[in-house]
Amino acid sequence: MLFTSYEFLLFAALLLVGYYLFPRAWQWRLLLVASLVFYWLAGPRYLIFLLLTASSTYAVGRWMDANLRAQETTLTEQRQAWEKEQRKSFKAREKKKRFRMLLLGLIFNFGMLAVLKYTGFAVHNVNRLLHAFGAENTLNIPSLLLPMGISFYTFQSMSYLIDVYREKVSAERHPLKFLLFVSYFPQLVQGPISRYADLGPQLTAGHAFSSRNVRWGLERVLWGYFKKLVIADRALIVIKALLDEPASYRGMYVLMMILLYTVQIYADFTGGIDITVGLSEAMGIRLTENFNRPFLSRSTKEYWNRWHITMGTWFTDYVFYPLSVCKPMQRLSKFSRQHFGNAVGKRIPVYLATVATWFLTGLWHGAGWNFIVWGLLNCLVILVSQECVPLYTRFYRRFPRLNESAVWHGVQAARTVLLMGVIRTLDCYRDVPLTFRLWGSMFTTFNYGDLFNGAVLDLGLGRADWILLLIATAVMFAVSLWGIREPVRAKLDRHPTAEASAVALVFLLIMIFGAYGIGFDASQFIYNQF
Amino acid sequence: MEVAVKKRILSGVCATVAVIVIWQLLTALMTPKYMTSIPEGALIAEYYEETSPHQVLFVGDCEVYENFSPITLWEEYGITSYIRGSAQQLIWQSYYLLDEMLRRESPEAVVFNVLSVKYGTPQNEAYNRMSIDGMRWSSSKWGAVQASMTEEEDAITYLFPLLRYHSRWNELSGEDITYLFRRDRVGYNGYLMQTGVRPVTSQPPWVPLEDYTVPQTCMDYLDKMREICEHYGVELILIKAPSIYPLWYEEWDAQIAAYAEAHGLAYYNFLAMSEEIGIDWERDTYDAGLHLNVWGAEKLSTYFGKLLTEKHGLTSQKNDAVLSGIWAEKCAAYAAEKANAVSPY
Amino acid sequence: MKKYVKTVTAMLAVLMLMTSMFACGSGEAEVTHETQRVEEWSLNVNGKELYVGMDMPKDLGEPTSYFEAASCAIQGLDKDYTYGSILVKTEDDGKTERIVGLTILDDGAATTMGVTIGDSRDKVVGAHSTPKSESETALVYAAGVGVIAKFLLRDGVVTSITYTLGE
């Protein structure tokens, strides 16, 4: 059930009405049923994998919890008898036990993800190697089903498990409440990746009807549909046309692809998140924000703090930090400092952890070298800019007023967005050498005249649609900027007439100008596949 | 109640009313008018303009609405009739249109053109729209929607046509404004007059099929059509109009003939009888044999009117002053349009 | 300063290495607007090779017979050209005329593998290998992207051979 399908609208409307008709203590049960139905409709067989993840994670969580409780009991009982050292070593031993439990949970679940999502890619690469070494026979690429949102719910579940291990949260005792945390349907499709501490208690708490929550939530849903249907799906028509024969659309078309894809993915992804967050808000559940105006980022690092935030923090908390401080890394750090000096030595572990994190981030986005190269290029840009900090410092010392200039900030933001856009084309062209050649063609194929000779009107959008796309995009960014200091909905809230008019207007605009239905090939959220 | 809350509720109600009104206006604006081109699309809705009952109701595809002239049936035999046909109208669409009409009036005979038994599955969204959009809301329309939808279609778009036609915003023309709230008449009791002449110069090549069995779905709808006619005490007459294309295979013909015989229905294959009817394939068709022009349609109607009178017991209604008045107007309009045509005779 | 230059250079070197690693892939694929041409499923008419999905050649010569039919209420023409034993069906939307079907009408023409009307089922399978699907009355082959080749059979004998758009 796509967010843009009529079925989903009906489903969400019925759920929302039912949610507030249900006694508060039963609301979470309704949510659970709705989530399971949603998932079941996506593919009954997928449900097995979701249930496997939920039950294994629940079991390991409870197991660790039981161990922790037993440890506490023993410690209390032995408070008098044991020395401090004895207590410490007992705790360490138990912690090690829990680590092994955690490892079991992680291996099982990430293993499932790896097998389902990456087997094809791995076999393909093995075949390439075999071929390179002259082997004639190749392995068959198995066709495995990829459950919807598996990356999202696996990551969310594993963050819970690690948090239980780290004793940041205590294990959920109610299996069905835990199942709801894993399967909560609005975020199954494309995130955000929530943490148990934030989401778990909210999901199961009852929520009284609040006109403001419902209004604000639905207004955000509506805005999400505007972004998705009026902008993203319209831009997608051209993108699809360009991707139909990528090699023949060079030069200006590559630049067009970069810009359009930037707009498309932003509108599609943030629009989808608006629908997810808005629908949750309407039910009184506040999800973690996944975006914070990434187009204002003045550096790649800042960009990744503003774009797909919950994925970034996941990798930081559960990959980067543990990797940076793990024992082998510390040993390496010590070794490299002794042998290469302090400056290089202290960088090696950080760099290694960064590269590993970005490698995995790339892989998370898709089973393909293009995604890995995309991740590593991001990494490269971040590391290079980190290395260039002294240069920047010197530069700003020479031009002290530049750093306060709004124009300069704009230039930096444009540069960042463009750079990210360029790198991102790897995920649509899908072919690394081809992408590199197409980047090159921007400087060698001078077909920029096609912008004005009507050639761009052959890409699926007529003149009126192009103009509409440009205006709607401008409106989208303008509204986003307007809401920096105070959310737009808060501004509208003070003027009921303006609020009602705005909602009516946006609704009608979506209905008329939305790229949906026959004739407009309404597409799936790009982030579905992750 | 607080003033602020009152204001909020009032704003909400006003906005909702405004959305509904604008929605209706937009629907009227965006829905195709089928006036200056593809007039076939406007035929189905014209039925509701009818003020008098009909003795004969035709249902079927272009082979009825371009091949039979109700005006001729009236002028020559005093038979009142109406054609409820649209482009590539599928058998279930004919059934549901019939279902709708039989609830509104009590004819003596129903004529169904059998060409559509070749299609056992939904075919084409554009034709579905032309057949169904013109129907008023009823359980018949809902049935037609459910039976006709192709995989890409959503039933809700028939309930709210704006959801289907919204993307016409960038192709609106003067026609959409002119016919915002009204339509011109395009047919004469469902007959779309064609006045061109294009002789048959070649026969379509005969290509064998894998399976000549009429799809079971079609046979089921034929049963339903027969049953509903029996229910209302109306005689069902099956016909195959004289069109040389799409090909009408002998094997299909045999199955329909057998069905008619088994259920005591009349079945006329006018294609096989075209010589007897007097159709001149040099002059009586406007598109090289696919459909008849007005001169061909009149010949066929004269022939069929005789059959209706002699074999099916239909009688002239010309003695009815009210009916005569109504039909005189129709005949005058028909004659006026025909007078503009260049006759091949 | 030197140190930073060194680091940046090293990183650029890594980038180039990565580029060369992936740049060893295959060359650009040939781009075509039409359905993929598959030689096995083409037919020769007046010295021209025809296959389903291609634009109708302008210089194919006079057909033995020609029939056209306008679709009801919709713009566009379906055209049937008969060249001896081969029927060429096209769709003309006013801008382009595309071949949507090729049919062998009698034993005056044959497939590239020499199969014609009147041949046995075994001869078809022998010449064109295993079909995609088969039944008592038909053998169906995948004949390129979105094209099928269908051999209709009656009593084990080929009665019709058609290449057409399909799944």
Image: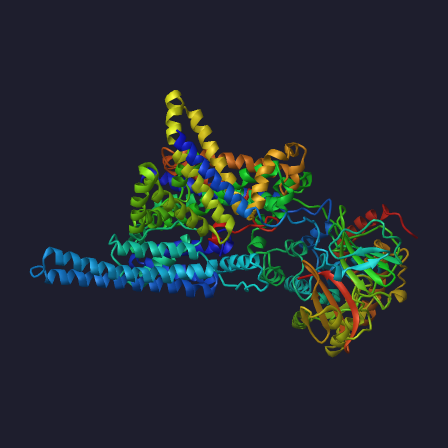
Q: Quick check: can you spot residue A499? A: yes
Q: Does A224 appear above or below B121?
A: above
Quarter of the rendering containing residue C120: bottom right
Residue occupying image coordinates x 30% and y 63%:
A60
Which quarter of the figure has residue A101?
bottom left
Taking the image as shown, residue A53 lies to the left or right of residue B75, namely: left
Direction left: furthest residue: A80
B235 versus A219 height, above or below: below
Compared across the picture, whether C62 is left or right of C138 comes to right
| Residue C48 in picture, x, y percent from top left | 83, 54
Toward the right, the furthest residue is B345
**Spot occupied by residue B4 in the image (x, y as percentages of width and height):** 34, 38
How did the renderer colour the structure? rainbow
Residue positioned 66% across, 64% down in the render: B121
Q: Quadrant of residue B322?
A: bottom right
- Please determine whether, in this image, residue A218 is positioned above or below residue A409: below
x and y percentages locating residue B89 in the rendered image? 70, 60
Q: Pick the residue in front: A215 or A434.
A: A434
Residue C63, x across and y down, in percent:
88, 56
> Which of B194 and B168 lies nearest the eye of the viewer?
B168
